[in-house]
Image (cartoon, grey):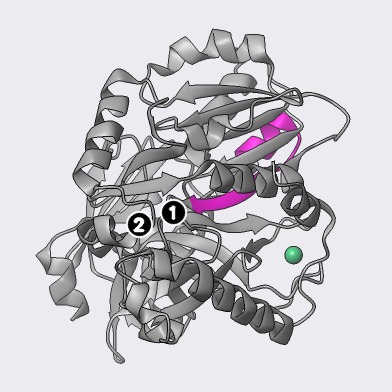
Amino acid sequence: MSLSAFLRSRYGRGFASRAEIEAHHDAAFRRFRAKVMPRSPFYRDMTGLPLAQLPRMNKARLMEEFSAINTCGIDRDQAIQIALSAETSRDFSPLIGDISVGLSTGTSGQRGLFLATSGERRLWAAIMLGRYWPQLWRRQRVAFFMRADNALYRSMSNLLVRFEFFDLLAPFDEHLPRLAALDPTVLVAPAQVLAVLAREHIAGRIALSPRRIISVAETLSPDDAALIRHAFGIGADQVYQATEGVLAMTCSRGQLHLNERWLRIDRDVIDPATGAFCPIIHDFTRKSLPILNYRLDDVLIPDPTPCACGCASQHIARIEGREDDILWWESAQGPRLITSEAIRTTIACLPQKLRDYGIVQRGKALHIWLDGAETGAENALREQLLNLGSRLKCRPPEFVFHTGSPPEIGAKRRRIRVEKGPHIDEFRA
Ligand SMILES: [Zn+2]
């Protein structure tokens, strides 16, 4: 493991000022330009360009240019073959040399390919463990729930850590006996899975006593955060991590900070009213597959107040979800972003009880499912949504109420979302 990264992540003070962060990024980019870019056929001739003038990347463009961008001479089609056969066999050990290959699938179904050298895997483990290790002198048992294993995460297993992987694609009930036997001190899982485990714990079907709970891979909603705290007596830390890198982590005060120690993160503001932005990242740790001027379609809501922990790195209120999961309502100034947080709060404040709900925007119609709701809930919600619209000076879409349980999409069950389709682009255009 990278000892200096571990120590810096555990004991290092945060950045004192914006100027210090910028100087740190300038130095990191100078090193990157001298040492890494010349080894990438794609970037070789661009070492003289400022960051903002490098080609704008996203998942699709990175895939197109994969063979030229990576510095290891790895061919895209060969890497895809290796990653696909690992997904099928669920044997995730295959490597090319010491480089592990992984596949990611976005909500759009677009496939992404990523690489990690053993050095990059050690750095990742050092940053994570430095930040979240509960007690240095005790051996920890880590349960890690994820969609696909890859050598990135298994590099954590050693004398200090017993690490077990739980495949999210396997039947959930099969995990419970093994999880109980492991009795993890650290529980790492997507937010929705943590919520399911919290319910199992409350129902007495499993007894867990983790000292650290880390929510990864998707947004932790306030409802789920409260449920997890109620079940286990501790709050969940959040690591906002995409295959493109570890983008943000909670600090000692439980606030999310962008990971500016290792990445530079610029903003593509999509809603000036809230400051909501899609991050454009430059990752100075990624030497096998350079990630430069890369736009993610996640939407982050900034928090302009300085964090009490004293670190000057960008502080965000929350990750709102994918760009495609944001509601847009009409206003005199054009379409306006409606956060899922505002909708959740509206629902939570209804005087009537309900079992569950789902809200889906399809073009200019807002489909609403209220499951097991008390009488009057529908009218109360209609009124509250209209109030929300007038507070935010915009007009809600037409409401279409449904009864019964809300529809589900795939493994990720999101209560509030926008259904993709040309009508949304028309609406926003
Ligand atoms: Zn903080």
State the quadrant of the N terminus.
top right
Quadrant of ligand 1: it is: bottom right
**Start-end of magenta stretch:** 227-241
Numbered tag placed on residue 126 in the rendering: none
Kindly identify the residue that appears in the image at 78 percent across and 68 percent down. Answer: 14
Determine whether label 1 and label 2 are within 8 Å by CB.
Answer: yes
Query: Residue 72 vs residue 407: left or right?
Result: right
Secondary structure type for disc 1: loop
Mark 1, Cα crowd under 10 Å, few <14 / some 14-19 / many 20+, is many
For the residue pair 106 and 220, the one nearer the viewer reads as 106
For the residue pair 217 and 68, the one nearer the viewer reads as 68
Mark 2, Cα crowd under 10 Å, few <14 / some 14-19 / many 20+, is many
Three-letter code for the amino acid on which mark 2 is drawn? Asn
Kindly identify the residue that appears in the image at 73 percent across and 76 percent down. Answer: 312
Q: Is residue 161 visible?
A: yes
Numbered tag placed on residue 70 in the rendering: 2
Q: Is 384 placed above or below 19 here?
A: above
Instruction: Look at the image and say whether residue 272 sits in the magenta stretch.
Output: no
Q: Is 122 placed above or below 158 here?
A: below
Q: Earlier in the sequence, mark 1 or mark 2?
A: 2
Query: Residue 429 vs residue 287: left or right?
Result: left
Kindly identify the residue that appears in the image at 69 percent across and 38 percent down. Answer: 229
Position in image of residue 40 (x %, y %): 36, 64
Position in image of residue 378 (x %, y %): 34, 52
Position in image of residue 50 (x %, y %): 44, 87
Three-letter code for the amino acid on which mark 1 is drawn? Ser
Q: Quadrant of the rendered structure where residue 71 is? A: bottom left
Secondary structure type for disc 2: loop
In this figure, which residue is indicated by the disc labeled 1? 288
Which residue is most to the bottom? 333
Label 1 vs label 2: CA separation?
A: 6 Å
